[in-house]
Image: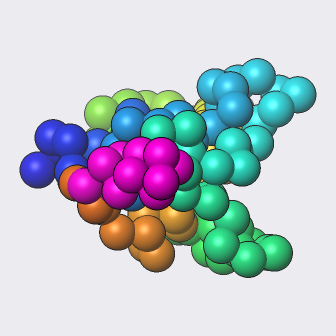
Amino acid sequence: MFGKGSRLYSIFKSKCPKCNEGKFFVSHPYDLSKVGDIHEHCDKCGLKYEKEPGFYYGAMYVAYALGVALFVTFWVSFNLFFENISLAWQIGSIIVGTIVLSPYIYALSKIIWANFFIKYDKDAIKHYEESTHS
């Protein structure tokens, strides 16, 4: 389920959705000068990451869903485990947590979006090598 070849492997390891080996992002999510920047092509299988101009605009919906999930997780956690914490502290903690996790959510939404549309191919690297050597 989490091994190579699964979408979860590609998402959490930030690997190419097609071959699960090439790097997807130029840098880590907290390198703020390059946050969310992706490579043009996979260095292992040659996959072009941006299928068309504006392809990753749809990742905004994924980012929104992740933000809502984060909010709900914080809110439920506070109300289950910290019953005496004030509403102001809850809201403040949620705001700070959201700001701190925003670069990661942004990057995560892009890799999730790509995995919606790009299918894993265990022979992708072999096919790429054959096509470049021919």
**Closest to the observer: 72 or 108?**
108
**Residue at position x 68%, y 64% from top?**
50
**Closest to the observer: 20 or 13?**
20
Is residue 122 in sight in this rendering?
A: yes
Q: Is residue 78 magenta?
A: no
Location of residue 68 (image quadrant): bottom right
What is the magenta segment's predominant secondary structure?
helix
Query: Across the whole image, how many numbered discs are drawn on residues?
Result: 0
**Residue at position x 81%, y 75% from top?**
53
**Closest to the observer: 95 or 89?**
95
The residue furthest front is 134
Q: Is residue 111 above or below residue 44?
A: below
**Residue at position x 73%, y 77% from top?**
52
Q: Is residue 129 magenta?
A: yes
The residue furthest left is 1
Q: Is residue 69 above or below residue 85?
A: below
Q: Is residue 88 above or below residue 17?
A: above
Is residue 8 in sight in this rendering?
A: no
Residue 14 percent location from the top left of the image: 47, 39
Residue 66 percent location from the top left of the image: 52, 58
Q: Is residue 21 above or below residue 42?
A: above
In the visual, does 31 lie left or right of 82?
right
In the visual, does 30 lie left or right of 115?
right
Location of residue 51 (image quadrant): bottom right
Residue 117 percent location from the top left of the image: 46, 75
In the visual, does 133 lie left or right of 97?
left
Residue 59 percent location from the top left of the image: 64, 67
Q: How is the image coloured?
A: rainbow
Magenta part of the chain:
123-134
**Residue at position x 53%, y 66% from top?**
113
